[in-house]
Amino acid sequence: MKIQVLGTGCHKCEKLAENVKRAASELNLDCEIEKVTDLNQIMAFGVMLTPALAIEGDVKVVGKVPSTEALKKLLT
């Protein structure tokens, strides 16, 4: 599974990345977590508000930082 955290590196983007790592770890997921910071790549997803989260290339979250529990539901 490929998980991408889309954001330029702001506090909220870092928090989303941290929550994603924690959720994936708690679920024992075999996944690749990638941070996408390039604005052109972020816009290629159709995302205009960060942070955002894409799972297998499909944008699931835009403009907010879900809790670890909410992310676990998205990842299963």
Image (tube, rainbow, N blue to C red):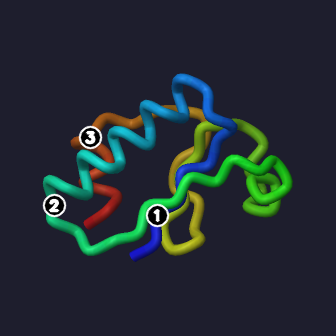
The residue wearing badge 3 is 68
Q: Nearer the viewer, residue 24 or 71?
A: 24
Mark 2, residue position: 27
> How many other residues sit within 10 Å of disc 2, few (<14), some (14-19) or many (≥20)?
few
Q: In x, y percent, where is residue 16?
A: 44, 38
Nearer to me, 60 or 42: 42
The quadrant holding residue 73 is bottom left
In the image, what residue type sits under mark 2?
A: Leu
The one nearer the camera, 37 or 69, is: 37
The residue pinned by badge 1 equals: 3
Q: Is residue 56 left or right of residue 75?
A: right
Pick whichever of labels 3 and 2 is earlier in the sequence.
Answer: 2
For label 1, the crowd category at 10 Å Cα-Cα, with few meaning under 14, some 14 to 19 and many 20 or more, is many
Q: Residue at x 15, y 65 (%)?
A: 28
Q: CA distance from mark 1 to mark 2?
A: 14 Å
- Above or below, comparing residue 5 to residue 54 in the picture: above
Within-10-Å neighbours for mark 3: few <14, some 14–19, many 20+: some
In the rendered image, which quarter contains the C terminus?
bottom left
Please tell me which residue is depicted at 77% across the width and 50% down the height of the picture: 38
Picture coordinates of residue 13, whole percent (x, y): 54, 34
Residue 15 percent location from the top left of the image = 43, 31
Q: Which of the marked residues, 1 or 2, is nearer the chain's N terminus?
A: 1
Q: Pointer 3 and pointer 2: residues touching (CB < 8 Å)?
A: no
